[in-house]
Image (tube, helix red, strand yellow):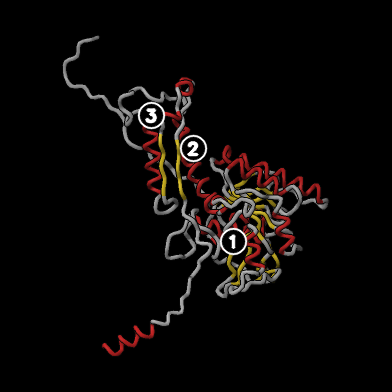
Amino acid sequence: MSFKKGVEIIETVSGPIPINEMASAIIAVVGTADAGDLGTLNIVRTAKEAAALYGKNGTLGEAFDAIYDHVKTLTVVSIRVATDGTESTQIANIVAGLKLIEDAYGQFGLFPKIIIAPGFSHKTGVGAEMVSIGNKIGAVSIIDAPETATPEQAVAFKGAFSDYRAIVTYPRVKTLNHDGQVVATWLSARYAALMSQVDKNQTGDNDPTGYWCSASNRVLQGVVGLERSIQFNPKDDDNELNYLAGQGIVSVLNGGSGFKAWGNRSTAFPASSDSLTFIPWRRTMDIIEDSIQFFTRQFLDKPMFTRPNDIATSLIGQIELSVNDFLRSKVGTALVYGKCELRIEDNPLTNLANGKVKYHLQATPPVPIEHVTYEAEVYVPGLEIALNQLIGG
């Protein structure tokens, strides 16, 4: 060892490392248009950009109109496909366009978290492809029930998509087109836009909103009516709107102060009744998990620890501290509880020797209020109490 005389400083890094939260308000839309390159991923952020790229017609034009009725700016990954008079070919074009969504991260460094294909999602094979892509990238797919369906037929249609990341919307809504005419348009695009509006905290609510909040019971912008009336009676549970919500379909309530999205559950409900059937629960867990996953990737191939007597400065210790710091920062908004723990029993020698580390992650998103009960008691003794107050002053 060489001789040293003087002062030496050895610098180490301890404590948590910030985790960047993944963006949730990113929509991917596949459809037809009058202009724009075919089979190409594009990023659109405003209505002006969308019109310049694709024009205002086709299913893409309708989708962008719905999206930018709710938010002034929003990142949308868009894919235009060719229009074809043969339905089988048209469906094949849409499916091919959907497959391109997986390339979004490689091209733009992001993954959409909401997938729509209005005008086509109800076609055989399209919804299934949307759900398949969504499960690969942690995105929800919003699928329209057929425009001719009755509530019972919509429920039967939804049965083909029993998945935590699949959402079926019904019926179509009436909106104004660019000529001021009332036309029927697909609900999926406006529901996706409303979901993004909630994510971006732009609903105008007094309390902040985000991806952990449900889009249900919030006004769908630009809607002036429904293509098919949905019967609702708040005094009687046996009504069409309640039936649809109870079968895991997102519908629309004419609440007197605007047409509101109605329904909290994915298509996994009611076959599954756990809390992950709540749409905001599944979305929240996707964002939390993705954020942690992408953060942790920077540490791959580095030594897991070199100072076994100092967990705070070891890599595996810093990861644990960082994830816990991130989870604590989400408590009060996206989470009510969160914890990350490195357990000895989860990390046997054989795994450590093969470079494998396992953490135990716990996270609890907030639950939307779905049902409220008041037990009303006709309290006759209140007369005596009131009289005593009156006489007694």
Can I make out residue 188 in this image? no
Image vertical order of residue 8 relative to residue 364, above or below: above
Image vertical order of residue 289 relative to residue 240, above or below: above
Q: Quadrant of the N terminus?
A: top left
Depth check: 325 or 4 in front? 325
Distance, label 1 to label 2, CA atoms, is 30 Å
Q: Which mark is residue 293?
A: 2
Circle 1 sits in a helix, a strand or a loop, which is it? loop
Identify the mark nearer the N-term, 3 or 2: 2
Question: Which residue is at 21% across, 22% downward?
Answer: 8
Residue count near mark 3 (Cα–Cα under 10 Å), binned few <14, some 14–19, many ≥20: some
Residue count near mark 2 (Cα–Cα under 10 Å), binned few <14, some 14–19, many ≥20: few
Identify the mark nearer the N-term, 1 or 2: 1
Circle 3 sits in a helix, a strand or a loop, which is it? helix
Distance, label 3 to label 2, CA atoms, is 15 Å
Q: Which residue is mark 1?
A: 263
Q: Which residue is mark 3?
A: 315
Please state if 374 lies on the left or on the right of 312 as rendered. Answer: right
Question: Which residue is at 59% across, 64% downward?
Answer: 262
Identify the mark nearer the N-term, 1 or 3: 1
- Check disc 1 and give the amino acid type: Gly
In this view, the mark in front (1 or 2) = 1
Question: Quadrant of the rendered structure where residue 344 is?
Answer: top left
Residue count near mark 1 (Cα–Cα under 10 Å), binned few <14, some 14–19, many ≥20: many
Circle 2 sits in a helix, a strand or a loop, which is it? helix
- Check disc 2 and give the amino acid type: Gln
